[in-house]
Image (cartoon, coloured by chain):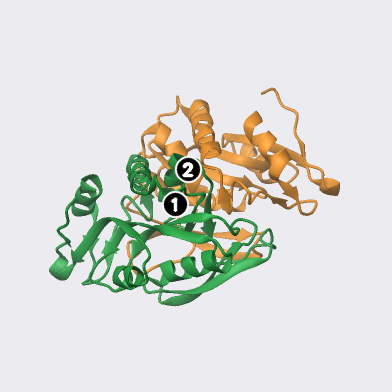
Chain colours: A orange, B green
């Protein structure tokens, strides 16, 4: 997705060999028009898949997930990292380790919102080692629902997440695939798009 | 906003005299079409105010904030509750007590994203005692920016937040104003809309 790649090149910062900072447009400040285009692109890629719901993880996944769900005319659900007083239902939960926060979180979704028969599109802002994706997949499968695929805004292809998921036959559609962040330079995987 | 009020009546649950659960459409599962309409409504109410940026707090404020920012053609920024490795800039911070989570959080925004001269529309999902709103206002004013007003999806008018903010001459526009949740019954403040 050229619009996204150009945004990453112009406004992203390679903080280290494996940390890409995109808080000017994705995970702290958000560019709403870019989110609209991301939602359209995920729709194009999964429109034949009879998606019944979009699932993401708070917080940075919410904007792309809601824009995607809008195109499919289905609800978006975000997994929560912590419980609140109004969050009392039976929960589907899984553990996820966050490299950028250096901590393990339990993430949870009310079992009211993912049901057997659902065909779930998982959306997330980043795919690195696949920890968050694996946790979201676990939640979907605990509910006896189906994972239609994963829509990733930025894949760090030099980390293992995408290849692990593909080896397990999950469909992964990444809008930008970063090959390297070495020496502060952002390069993308050359692909057919 | 009748669409929202009807949604609250049909899908909201008064869990107690002061807790309204709206996780079917706003703060766990999200109705994307409703978010579009909320964004349009906030735009209508603030369109003459030369808004330069929309500010909210993760996580439940993000969807309405992004849809609002889309109408104004400005960025949305969400304050974070915790730091991450990619969140290293100088920070504007304020404390906020969450009643529903029974804890105090420090919330922060990079000083890169709110500048003197900005005219900020603050968006949040709920206004109860005004703790989160006060913290977001503090962050804006620490940056020598201006608070154009507050756009609230659901105001719990029986709590003190709205009256405190109005007494300080902040403009508050709430799309649904809940008068009472007593005995499990949701009633709205009768107003001119």
- Horizontal and vertical percent for residue B166? 32, 68
Q: Quadrant of residue B106?
A: bottom right
> Looking at this view, is B87 or A68 the one in front?
B87
Q: Vertical placement of A107 versus B18: above or below?
A: above
Please tell me whether mark 2 sits on a helix, a strand or a loop.
helix
Residue B189 in the image, given as x and y percentages of width and height: 17, 61
What chain does mark 1 sit on? A
* Residue A171 image point, x, y percent: 57, 34
- Which of the pair A74/B52 is nearer the observer? B52
Question: Does label 1 lie on the same chain as label 2?
Answer: yes
Residue bearing the label numbered 1? A78
**Is the residue under label 1 in contact with that under label 2 (CB below 8 Å)?**
yes
For label 1, the SS is strand
- Is residue A120 visible in the rendered structure shown here? no
The residue wearing badge 2 is: A65
Q: Quadrant of residue A161?
A: top right
Which mark is first along the chain, 1 or 2? 2
């Amino acid at each position: 997705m050229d619009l996204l790649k150009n945004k990453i090149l112009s406004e992203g910062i390679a903080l280290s060999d494996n940390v890409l900072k995109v808080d000017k447009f994705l995970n702290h400040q958000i560019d709403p028009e870019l989110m609209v285009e991301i939602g359209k692109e995920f729709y194009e890629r999964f429109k034949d898949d009879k998606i019944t719901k979009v699932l993401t993880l708070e917080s940075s996944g919410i904007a792309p997930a809601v824009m995607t769900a809008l195109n499919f005319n289905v609800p978006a659900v975000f997994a929560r990292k912590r419980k609140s007083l109004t969050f009392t239902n039976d929960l589907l939960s899984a553990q996820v380790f966050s490299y950028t926060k250096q901590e393990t979180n339990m993430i949870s979704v009310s079992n009211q919102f993912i049901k057997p028969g659902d065909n779930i599109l998982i959306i997330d802002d980043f795919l690195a080692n696949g920890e968050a994706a694996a946790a979201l997949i676990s939640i979907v499968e605990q509910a006896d629902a189906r994972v239609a695929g994963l829509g990733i805004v930025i894949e760090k292809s030099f980390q293992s997440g995408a290849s692990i998921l593909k080896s397990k036959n999950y469909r992964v559609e990444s809008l930008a695939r970063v090959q390297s962040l070495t020496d502060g330079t952002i390069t993308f995987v050359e692909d057919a798009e």
